[in-house]
Amino acid sequence: MGLLLSRIEVQPFTETHMDGSRDAGFPESQTDGAVNGVCSRGSATAVGTAGAAPATLSSSAAKREKVAYIWGTHIGERNVQRSDRVEMSAESVASATEAADRMTTDTRALTYMVGWHHSHPRIPAVPSSVDLCTQRRFQQYTESG
């Protein structure tokens, strides 16, 4: 299991319409905060965010986007050694945070821990209920400082 290290930028989303005209973004991002979930239905996508009410993004409504440039991973130790669990120790998370701080110092670009990754070698690659709970706890931990 590894933690993802990245820098985050909010950029205008330029849209090209069917008639060839172009449209740039609004002054404020409507999806500030960490993304908690994404649900699609038809041509609209509902995005739940940690810092704001859920926003709906459609082909004409999304004007700004948050982009994470993943530029490192930190491989942590599993503290639960069962085939159906992937849990990391608090020490591994703290070590990844220190690695992000070192990357910030070295590159002069603010680097965050933005997520975690692991493989599902014997089950479908769909996030399990355990994965979703782990992600929720991870976001709460990183948002609390």
Image (cartoon, helix red, strand yellow):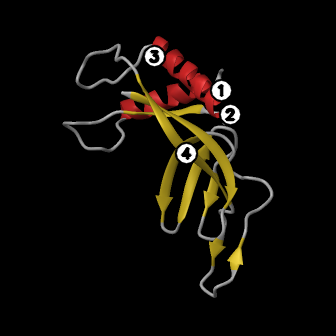
- The kind of residue tagged 2 is Arg
Q: Quadrant of the N terminus?
A: top left
Circle 3: element type: helix
Q: Nearer the viewer, mark 3 or mark 2?
A: 2
Lower position in the chain sequence, tag 4 or tag 2: 4
Lower position in the chain sequence, tag 3 or tag 1: 3
Give how far apart the Cα atoms at labels 1 and 2 are. 5 Å
Q: Are marks 1 and 4 in contact (CB under 8 Å)?
A: no
Residue designated by label 4: 69
Residue 125 image point, x, y percent: 29, 44
| Side of 17 relative to 82 (left or right) | right
Looking at the picture, does residue 30 appear above or below residue 14? Answer: above
Residue designated by label 1: 105
Locate residue 36: give its quadrant.
Answer: top right
Give how far apart the Cα atoms at labels 4 and 3 are. 22 Å
Residue plotted at (61% across, 24% down): 101
Locate residue 51: give its quadrant.
Answer: top right
Crowd tier of the residue under label 3, counting other residues whose Cα lies within 10 Å: few below 14, some 14–19, many 20 or above? some
